[in-house]
Image (spheres, rainbow, N blue to C red):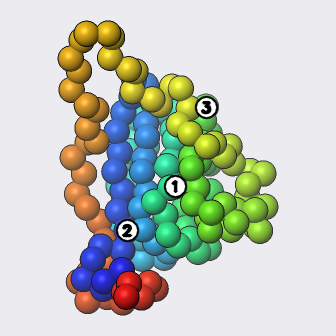
Amino acid sequence: MNVEEVAFFLRERTVGAALVIELHGELDIWARTQLSPRLEELLDRPWPSVAVDLSGVTFLDACGLGMLVWLQARIKAYGGRLSLVRPAPNVARILRITRLDRAFTLLDDLPASCRVPAPEQGASAAPASPAQVPVLGRPTGTASRHRPSA
């Protein structure tokens, strides 16, 4: 990853009464400080189902784990359910090592409540688009843990 590139970002979308949050990049202390205000905004209303797609997460440290634990506690506080979806192999390994895989619902795909329904035969449907969310990331020039590809 080039140091000029964004090190992390999030996208969200709603499907019915469910919230889907896609996290991408490095979830570390910097990401947590930048993402927390947006996550708090998203959780200002109770969601019965929240799915966090981790397939784009390339790095996860203790602060990133703490953010996931905080999300779970916040969502459970109003009776909602959190699912962690498609964790990348390195992220799944960290969840296993820390035994947090036992504390979270881990899924290989989005729960049915979070999927966009398929259009009816012959009907034209616009693709579901993520909500317009500002891209969050490290300031330009901040080093990343990833070396540029050869």
Residue highlighted by disc 3: 79
Q: In the visual, does 135 lie left or right of 118?
A: left
From the image, state whether disc 2 or disc 3 is nearer to you: 2
Residue 48 drawn at (x, y percent): 53, 29
Residue type at tag 2 = Phe
Location of the C terminus by quadrant is bottom left
Q: Are marks 1 and 3 in contact (CB under 8 Å)?
A: no
Residue highlighted by disc 1: 54
Name the foreground residue: 63 vs 84.
Answer: 84
Residue found 26% across the figure and 38% down from its top = 129
Q: In the visual, does 112 lie left or right of 143?
A: right
Label placed on residue 103: none
Residue placed furthest toward the front: 150
Q: In terms of sequence position, does the residue under pointer 1 or pointer 2 come before the other?
A: 2
Structural distance between the alpha carbons of marks 1 and 3? 22 Å
Q: In terms of sequence position, does the residue under pointer 1 or pointer 3 come before the other?
A: 1
Residue type at tag 3 = Gly
Residue 62 drawn at (x, y percent): 62, 73
Residue type at tag 1 = Leu
Q: Secondary structure at mark 1?
A: strand
Q: Secondary structure at mark 3?
A: loop
Query: Is residue 2 depicted above or below 114 in this figure?
Result: below
Location of the N terminus by quadrant is bottom left
Structural distance between the alpha carbons of marks 1 and 2? 12 Å
